[in-house]
Amino acid sequence: MDFAFSEDQLSFRDAVRDLLTRECGASVVRDAWSNSDGRSGQVWDLLSEMGVLGILAPEVDGGMGMTMIDLVLLVEECGRVALPEPIIEHAAVSAPIIGGVVSGSRTVTSFIGGSPFALYADSCEVALVERDQRLFTVERDALRLTTEIAVDGSRRLSTLAWSDSDATEVGGPLEAAAAFDRGALGAAALLLGLSHRMLEMSVEYASERRQFGAPIGSFQAVKHHLANARIALEFARPLVTRAAYSLSVGDPDASVHVSMAKAQASDAAMLTSAHALQCHGAIGYSFEYDLHMWMKRAWALSSSWGDASLHRARVAKAVL
């Protein structure tokens, strides 16, 4: 049996990587900290044109009718560039439920899974919200927003309020649970991409920064930090892939696999960010240096869609 990704899946990933590398550099992420909506400008529209945003939406709704195993590599690429967009909320969480909206040009955010905040709600057109384990859609004009402060300035956070008369029910407890799993897995995939890029930045810096007449990357302590980060990342990646496959084929243990993936990816991202900062030294704290944007996104996502402790508790409950 072949467990590798297909040639089509890898080609799609490469195309998305090329697009994001070209159109979503660090300057785009930095600009999202101070622009009007915290988003990436034309990058979102380009991803929509490629079909990324509607990849999980049913074909009858104009989507691609694919599965999480097809999306997970693309989300990781979004993490690699720290894409300042609601890619999880739109493409992973909402697409299978309200595909007709998601596969079009409208942006969807979500307010489910026990999270107190919605991402980019001030610039979305529709929100997928949860109340009493039921899912509803609410148009942006019917939402009452309260802006919240985020550690990652490119993640525009809000708390939401709405009237029942403005909400349209689109799912019950089963759909809400499945949406949470897709959100948690999407966050895990983003964390893989973020970790990979932080590790790349650290290797590049350690190769160039010299101390005592030698690159600091030649020092054993620095090598150990980078090696430990790489090991943590490589342990997390197969768990994320397995969870994506489990969701795609309807494995009854898919929720457990998602929790294993999210817990490991959160741990890997936190470890990588700590070691990246250690290897960079004081410059890593600098607002002018790019590393801080990836670190802060990793900190935020590590606790989003359930932190490592919550997901370990879900695994423990399943095996007891």
Image: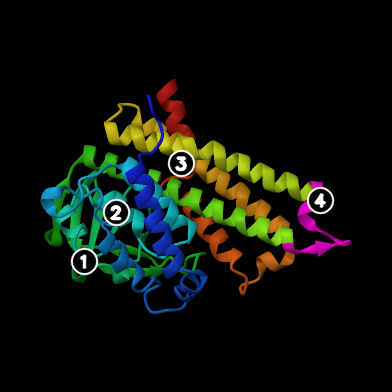
Q: Reading the chain from its start, which is encountered first: label 2 or label 1?
A: 2
Label 2: which residue? 91
Residue 228 covered by magenta stretch: no
Q: CA distance from mark 1 to mark 4?
A: 50 Å
Label 3: which residue? 262
Residue type beneath disc 1 = Ser
Label 4: which residue? 219
Residue 210 covered by magenta stretch: yes
Q: Is residue 36 above or below residue 115?
A: below
Please report contact status of discs 2 and 1: CB closer than 8 Å, yes or no. Answer: no
Q: Is residue 310 visible?
A: no
Between marks 1 and 3 in the image, the one whose residue lies nearer the viewer: 1
For the C terminus, the image quarter is top left
Q: Is residue 44 above or below residue 175?
A: below
Q: Secondary structure at mark 1?
A: loop
Q: Say which of 205 and 282 sits in front.
A: 205
Q: CA distance from mark 1 to mark 3?
A: 29 Å
Q: Around disc 1, counting alpha carbons within 10 Å, would you say few (fewer than 14), some (14 to 19), or many (20 or more)? A: some
Tell me what residue is drawn at x 46 percent, y 64 percent.
21
Label 1: which residue? 105
Name the spot of residue 1 as percent of width and height, x first.
37, 24
Residue type beneath disc 3 = Lys
Between marks 1 and 4 in the image, the one whose residue lies nearer the viewer: 4
Q: Around disc 2, counting alpha carbons within 10 Å, would you say few (fewer than 14), some (14 to 19), or many (20 or more)? A: many
